[in-house]
Amino acid sequence: MLTNIPTEVRVAIQNAPGRVDAAKFINTWARNNNRADVLNDPEGISQFIADARGIKFEIVLPVVRKILAGE
């Protein structure tokens, strides 16, 4: 699970319109805050979004992997 993620990021994830937007938000946040460690952890990002949004991990993971791959 991701560590040291600010509460405002969690709130933004909960309020994002869809899981793709949530994953894009994490991607943007990590790049803007020099958190490459976060980008190297698609499972952690997926678990974070799944927990914050109440979505199944298995649904989020493929979306996160595509976004991190730049697709």
Image (cartoon, helix red, strand yellow):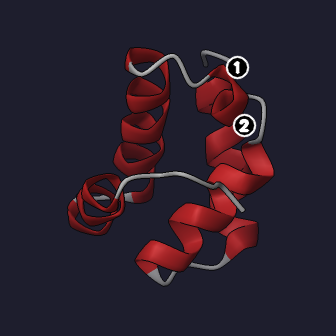
- Image height check: is 63 above or below 49? above
Q: Are marks 2 and 1 in contact (CB under 8 Å)?
A: yes
Q: Which residue is mark 1?
A: 69
Q: Tell me which amino acid carries mark 1.
A: Ala
Taking the spot 32% from the left edge, 62% from the top edge, the residue there is: 7
Q: Secondary structure at mark 1?
A: loop
**Residue 37 as seen in the image, left or right of residue 48:** right
The part of the image, by quadrant, that contains residue 29 is top left
Q: Which residue is mark 2?
A: 65
- Image height check: is 25 above or below 67? below
Of 71 and 30, nearer the camera is 30
Determine the CA span between mark 2 and mark 1.
Answer: 6 Å
Extreme residue in the bottom direction:
54
Taking the spot 72% from the left edge, 54% from the top edge, the residue there is: 44
The part of the image, by quadrant, that contains residue 14 is bottom left
Of 15 and 33, nearer the camera is 33
| Residue 15 position within the rendered picture, expressed as x and y whole percent measured from the top left | 21, 65
| Residue 47 position within the rendered picture, expressed as x and y whole percent measured from the top left | 67, 66
| Residue 40 position within the rendered picture, expressed as x and y whole percent measured from the top left | 77, 29
How packed is label 2: few (under 14 Cα within 10 Å), some, or many (20 or more)? some
Of 33 and 16, nearer the camera is 33
How packed is label 1: few (under 14 Cα within 10 Å), some, or many (20 or more)? few
Taking the spot 77% from the left edge, 40% from the top edge, the residue there is: 41
The number of numbered discs placed on residues in the rendered structure image is: 2
Q: Secondary structure at mark 2?
A: helix
| Residue 57 position within the rendered picture, expressed as x and y whole percent measured from the top left | 70, 71
Taking the spot 67% from the left edge, 29% from the top edge, the residue there is: 39
Q: Tell me which amino acid carries mark 2.
A: Arg
Q: Which quadrant is the C terminus positioned in?
A: top right
